[in-house]
Image (tube, rainbow, N blue to C red):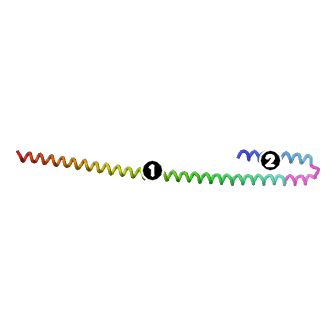
Amino acid sequence: MKDQTRVIAALLIGAAAGAALGLLLAPEKGETIRDGIADYINDLVDAAKDKAQAATKDIKQYSGTVYDKAKTKLSGVVDDLNEYKDVAVETARSKAGELKEQAQTKFNEGKARVKNGSADVNNSIQDS
């Protein structure tokens, strides 16, 4: 971008220097010279406008490309996060189920021990 600015600045400086030399060395009438200078300046302005429009178009295309790439990458990251979330939820559910089964087993074992202990106490009372 800086190179284009330098080229445009050099072009304008060169145009001004050329116009000054043209005025000094021209054998034509003042009106003809003024018309020529006006045409030349209009051509320079048109060229600068064309350059600016081209640069704007390039910037829009580049920004659109960057936006699309960023959107694609973000979409990929979101998809990966959703997969990790699903795996984490499934793992948590699986572990919770295992813990529930273990707790139920321990509860049943404790219940059986209490039942057996109370049966032993009951038998010992009846034997006495």
Residue type at the position of mark 1: Tyr
Specify the segment rendered in magenta: 26-38
Q: Which quadrant holds residue 6?
A: top right
Around disc 1, counting alpha carbons within 10 Å, would you say few (fewer than 14), some (14 to 19), or many (20 or more)? Answer: few
Around disc 2, counting alpha carbons within 10 Å, would you say few (fewer than 14), some (14 to 19), or many (20 or more)? Answer: some
Q: Is residue 83 left or right of residue 54?
A: left
Question: What percent of the width, then of the height, locates residue 97?
Answer: 33, 51
Who comes first in sequence, dot 2 or dot 1?
2
Question: What percent of the width, then of the height, locates residue 124?
Answer: 8, 45
Residue bearing the label numbered 2: 12
Question: What percent of the width, then of the height, locates residue 60?
Answer: 66, 54
Q: Is residue 85 left or right of residue 75?
A: left
Q: Nearer the viewer, residue 73 or 51?
A: 73
Residue depicted at x 12% and y 46%: 120
Element under disc 2:
helix
Residue depicted at x 35% and y 51%: 94
Residue bearing the label numbered 1: 84
Quadrant showing the C terminus: top left
The majority secondary structure of the magenta stretch comes to helix
Residue depicted at x 92% and y 47%: 25
How many dots with numbers?
2
Residue depicted at x 89% and y 52%: 33
Q: CA distance from mark 2 to mark 1?
A: 59 Å
Element under disc 1:
helix
